[in-house]
Image (cartoon, rainbow, N blue to C red):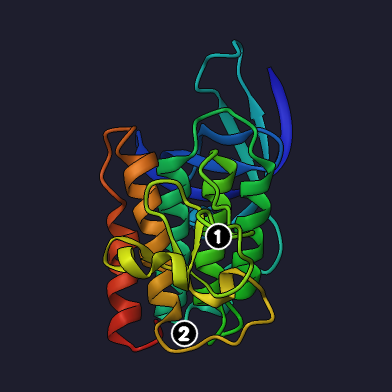
């Protein structure tokens, strides 16, 4: 079994003297793990940081084996983020969520493109937290738990959609949701339209929304906790008043 693909590194753990087991989010094959020899070398180590984009060449004698891979860096790498610890935290959180949520060896091209869009957005200091929320919403969509924000679930109204049902992921209007507002999740306007202006508290509301569905419908089903990197990112965003 041999293939080549472009991928983002989701994580790496040491294996043997100088190798590593590396998890990739590939374009055509989804989440894929492989052994990379020489991972601790000065040449390869920078390319095995979470979020790095690489070209992967994979080889295994049997389709169900772990297999080995060689990699080559793609693009400019992560050097532009070294002076922004919060952006690096966002990248680590996205990689951890994708690694924990996506099934192994199952194609999810949409997840790859969502991750790519997020990495491109980190250069926009004030905008990337909202893109991160969209990334998690896209990941939920890929996994079959996408939101239906097209109209009010109760009345069919298209106006004043400000809540989301925590059970169904469907939008609820202000009027219909008023009696149940303490049980509903806030719907930040930027998830309805990219033209909406980002207001204070919108990113925090978005993270609460996507976090609820990730925890309740994805990680709970896998008997896994939410990744610590994701929780740390939320804490940092709130502390720096960027949520």
Q: Is residue 239 left or right of residue 195?
A: left
Residue 228 x, y percent position in the rendering = 27, 57
Q: Are marks 1 and 2 in contact (CB under 8 Å)?
A: no
Residue 23 x, y percent position in the rendering = 49, 40
Name the residue that disc number 2 marks. 83
Q: Earlier in the sequence, mark 1 or mark 2?
A: 2
Residue 92 x, y percent position in the rendering = 42, 61
Q: Return the mark for residue 152.
A: 1
Residue at 47% in and 75% down: 87
Residue at 54% in and 85% down: 198
Quadrant location of residue 61? top right
Is residue 99 something that shows in the picture?
yes
Check the image and report above or below for 93 versus 145.
below
Q: Nearer the viewer, residue 188 or 71?
A: 188
Q: Is residue 162 left or right of residue 214?
A: right
Q: Quadrant of the image for the C terminus? A: bottom left
Categorize mark 1 by other alpha carbons within 10 Å: few (<14), some (14-19), many (20+).
many
- Could you say whether the residue bearing mark 1 is in a helix, strand or loop? loop
- Could you say whether the residue bearing mark 2 is in a helix, strand or loop? loop
Residue at 32% in and 60% down: 229
């Amino acid at each position: 079994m041999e293939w080549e693909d472009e991928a983002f590194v989701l994580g790496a753990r040491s294996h043997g003297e100088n190798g590593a087991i590396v998890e990739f989010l590939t374009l055509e094959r989804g989440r894929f793990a492989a052994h990379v020899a020489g991972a601790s070398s000065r040449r390869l180590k920078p390319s095995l940081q979470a979020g790095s984009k690489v070209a992967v060449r994979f080889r295994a004698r049997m389709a169900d084996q772990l297999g080995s891979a060689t990699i080559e860096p793609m693009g400019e790498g992560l050097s532009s983020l070294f002076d922004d610890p919060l952006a690096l935290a966002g990248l680590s959180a996205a990689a951890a969520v994708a690694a924990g949520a996506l099934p192994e060896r199952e194609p999810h091209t949409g997840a790859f493109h969502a991750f790519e869009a997020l990495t491109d957005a980190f250069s926009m200091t004030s905008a990337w937290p909202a893109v991160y929320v969209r990334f998690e919403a896209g990941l939920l969509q890929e996994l079959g738990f996408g939101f239906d924000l097209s109209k009010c679930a109760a009345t069919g109204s298209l106006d004043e959609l400000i809540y989301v049902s925590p059970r169904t992921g469907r939008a609820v209007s202000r009027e219909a949701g008023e009696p149940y507002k303490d049980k509903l999740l806030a719907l930040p306007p930027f998830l309805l339209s990219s033209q909406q202006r980002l207001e204070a508290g919108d990113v925090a509301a978005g993270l609460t929304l996507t976090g609820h569905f990730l925890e309740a419908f994805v990680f709970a089903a896998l008997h896994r906790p939410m990744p610590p990197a994701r929780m740390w990112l939320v804490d940092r965003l709130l502390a720096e008043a960027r949520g």
